[in-house]
Every structure is written in structure tokens, then in C-alpha cells.
Amino acid sequence: MLGSFSIAQISLNAQKKYYQWMILAVLLTTGILFSCENSMDEIQRVDIGSNAPDEISKDLRLVYSDSAMAKIELFAATAEKLNGKQEITKLKDSLRVNFFNKKGKKVSTLFALYGEINDIQNIVYVKDSVRFYNFEKKQLLETEALFWNRTDSTIYTEGQVIVKSPDGTALGTGFRTKQDFSKYTILKPEGQILVKDSENKN
């Protein structure tokens, strides 16, 4: 009886140790799985939050033509393409857009230090030291930001503008024109200085 009792006791102890090791192994395995899952979540969050461009171009030149004749010519020092829902191209370190008439003559030019092309909305946004010039009228627009709608050729802003020409200078807030800049509208004029009037006063 004593012998059988000792063997049973040893067997019971062995089973307890076995179950303890099994529980420990399960806990360790679960911890490793949770650790891996957390690491993958962190990696995914880093990837999703990254704004790294898909394409980078230097000295970019884009030409939009109609019947083999250039209508729009765009230059940018640096272009960064971001693919996704918006399809954004960021133009950095200065840009220039030349607009041509139906005969292929350059009629106006747009300058800025920064811009964004939204291919989905067909809108171009430019900002920082924005200048828009009409060659025939020698007319210059100065502002801090502009939108160019490529669908209907309108160029506009809700900000403050200054328009300089040989006839004088016009100031105001809000601006509308076409990409040839032959005519324009200041939505809220705030003043106008005419060259002829100032010459007559002197």
C-alpha cells in the first residue's frame, strides 16, 4: 500500500508540473503573438502616416497641346507625385506656367514659389510670391495665392490683390480672370491709382 501510494503521489506531482509547463508555454506563446501583432500595427501606422512621394522629378517640363500646338507649358524645379485618392503633384522651389493663344503665341505667364496639381479636381493651386503677367497689356497681378481651374480656364483668388499696368495700379480683395489675363474683375475694389491723374496733379 505504501509503495502504491508513493507511485501515485509521484505521478500526480508529475502531472502538476506538466500542466504548469503547458500553461507557461501557452502564456509565452500568447505574449509573443501579441508582441508581433503590436509590431505589425506600428509598422502599418508608420506606412499609412508617411507622406513620402511616389515619384520625384527635377526640372519638370509639361506641355499641354491641342492639334500639335502648345497651349500651356509648365516648368517646376522639383515635382513630387503623390498617388492615391487625390492624385496630387507638389511643385516646389519655384514654378512657371506659360499660356498660349490659338495661334501659338505666348500671351501670359504665371509665377509662384509653390504649387499643387490636383488631377482629380483638375485644379492647380499656387502660393508664395505669386505673379501673373499679360505681355500685350504689360499687366501684372501680385498676390499670395491663386487657383487655376483647368476645366474652364478661370484663374481666381479670394485674397488681396494688386494689379499694375501702364495706366495705373488697382487694389482690392477677390479676383477673377481667364488664363490669358486679357480682362479681369476685382470683386471688392479698395482703391485705384491712375498714372494719368497722378501726372496731371504733378
Image (cartoon, helix red, strand yellow):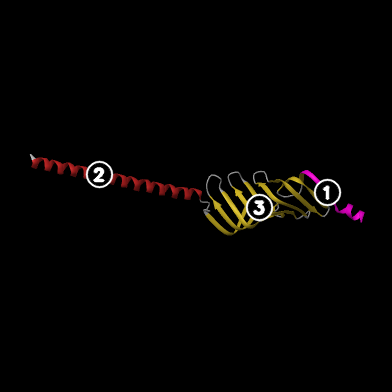
Question: Where's residue 55, x and y in %?
Answer: 53, 55
Q: Is residue 63 magenta?
A: no
Q: Is residue 200 magenta?
A: yes
Q: Secondary structure at mark 1?
A: strand
Question: In the image, what residue occupies the spot 7% across and 39% down?
Answer: 1
Q: Is residue 175 left or right of residue 37?
A: right
Question: In the image, what residue occupies the spot 23% across and 43% down?
Answer: 19
Q: Which residues are magenta?
A: 187-202
Measure how far apart labels 3 and 2 are at the Cα level: 77 Å
**Residue on which disc 1 sits:** 192
Q: Examine the image and state in which quarter residue 176 appears.
A: top right
Disc 2 and disc 1 in contact, CB within 8 angstroms? no
Q: Secondary structure at mark 3?
A: strand
Disc nearest the viewer among 2 and 1:
2
Question: In the image, what residue occupies the spot 45% across and 48% down?
Answer: 44
Give the label on residue 20, or none. 2
Of the residues under marks 3 and 2, which one precedes in the sequence?
A: 2
Q: How would you rate the neighbour count of disc 2 (Cα within 10 Å): few for under 14, some for 14-19, many for 20 or more?
A: few
Measure how far apart labels 3 and 1 are at the Cα level: 31 Å
Residue 45 appears in the picture as rendered: yes
Residue 67 appears in the picture as rendered: no
Toward the viewer: 179 or 71?
179
Q: Is residue 154 left or right of residue 83?
A: right
So how many labels did they put on this image? Answer: 3
Q: Amino acid at mark 1?
A: Gln
Q: Secondary structure at mark 2?
A: helix
Disc nearest the viewer among 3 and 1:
1
Q: Residue furthest top?
A: 1
Toward the viewer: 100 or 85?
85
Question: Where's residue 138, x and y in %?
Answer: 78, 55
Q: Amino acid at mark 3?
A: Ile
